Amino acid sequence: MDLRLRRVELAFAAPLQTAYGELRSRELIEVTLTDEEGLEGRGEAAPLEPYDGVSVERTLEALEAYRRALADPPEGATLLDACRAADDLPQALAAIDMGLWDLAGRRARRPVCELLSSSPAASIAVNASIATTDPAAAATAAAAAVKEGYTCVKLKVGVGDDEARVAAVRSAIGAQTALRLDANGAWSVGQAVSILGVLADHALELVEEPVEGLEATRELRERVPVRIAIDETAAQAGALTARVADAVCLKISRCGGIGGLLAAASLVRSSGADIYLSSSYDGPLGIAAALHAAAALAPLPPCGLATLELFAQAPPASLRVSRGAIAVPSAAGLGV
């Protein structure tokens, strides 16, 4: 199996303010796998160092190790297991996993979701992401999203005047639209108790990663009247079955690909928590892979997969949001 790599940089339409800093662009690594018959499968590595601590250089190092493993895998080992044995880095393994699923779908002339489920969903509801820190601008953007058909709005908090921004957005979207907050672990338990005690008055669907760590999340959940989800904390050992949150946000990159995400979803559901999928500002290949996984796991709450809309470059037509949902690609493989 031949492996080719290409670095890609996508600029955001406007700088994104997060609890871990400002993002102006996104660097990704696209991979192409070519089998002995010349058929190609594509995948994408999407490390985000401020978020997951993994650099592009570290990911490239792992992918170079995979080049050797793919060319001459140990006898009896699957290609993905051979790569994992060479360097067990989820962000890099995700790219190989995607490429292998893309290849499998192309060989079978079927979309990946049909290889994962006998009755995959045809489309996935997604949330609108509001990144601006200005309350008036956030309210305007949220109202526009509702008019476009979104039923869930996600707002970054832990930056700027959270109370004013949340109040403005709730007023703009009305009572019927779900309002989800994401703090990226910005608060201590004490801060979160105080802040969420106020913000809870705005009928929140859930608050994602208000604090960091399993014990902090467990303590907070017992002290606030809102549903709590974990995201970054889900990467910690034992987190998927720890029963510290009402929901768990799963990501293709952190789970090591489609196969790893489906396994993680099974563990979370066995613990009684809900799941939804999200993007770490992935490119088109990563979003497509997540849509196929979501189609196999449906029904799900709205997923955070509309992030291609945040880039300056328009998303592929097959991945555009329509009335608050994205159609699962129907072409063979990942369909991108």
Image (tube, rainbow, N blue to C red):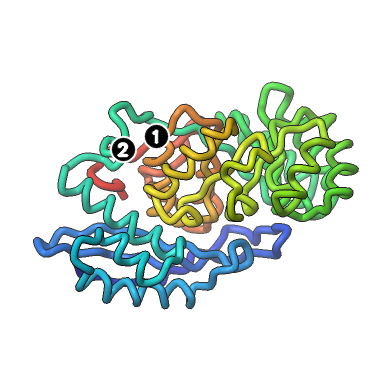
Q: Quadrant of residue 220?
A: top right
Identify residue type, mark 1.
Ala
Residue found farthest to the top? 176
Do tag 2 and tag 1 residues touch (Cβ < 8 Å)? Answer: yes
| Real-space CA distance between mark 2 and mark 1, rounded to the nearest whole angstrom | 9 Å
Q: Badge 2: how crowded within 10 Å, few (<14), some, or many (20+)? A: some
Q: Split into 4 quadrants, where in the image is the N terminus?
A: bottom left
Badge 2 marks a residue whose secondary structure is helix
Residue 55 point in image, percent of width and height:
53, 72
Residue carrying label 2: 116
Q: Residue at x 26, y 47 (%)?
A: 333
Sequence-first disc among 2 and 1: 2
Identify residue type, mark 2.
Leu
Q: Badge 1: how crowded within 10 Å, few (<14), some, or many (20+)? A: many
Is residue 32 visible to the viewer in this orientation of the structure? yes
Horizontal side of 198 relative to 146 (left or right) equals: right
Horizontal side of 297 relative to 65 (left or right) equals: right
Q: Residue at x 53, y 46 (%)?
A: 250
Seen in the picture, residue 97 relative to 163 is either above or below; the reply is: below
Q: Which mark is residue 295?
A: 1
Residue 99 point in image, percent of width and height:
29, 57
Q: Residue at x 16, y 62 (%)?
A: 35
Horizontal side of 186 relative to 63 (left or right) equals: right
Q: Which mark is residue 274?
A: none
Badge 1 marks a residue whose secondary structure is helix
Which of label 2 and label 1 is nearer to you? 2
Tally of numbered discs:
2
Residue 112 point in image, percent of width and height:
29, 42
Q: Residue at x 12, y 63 (%)?
A: 38
Horizontal side of 335 relative to 180 (left or right) equals: left
Q: In the image shown, does 39 or 271 lie closer to the viewer?
A: 271
Seen in the picture, residue 5 relative to 191 is either above or below; the reply is: below
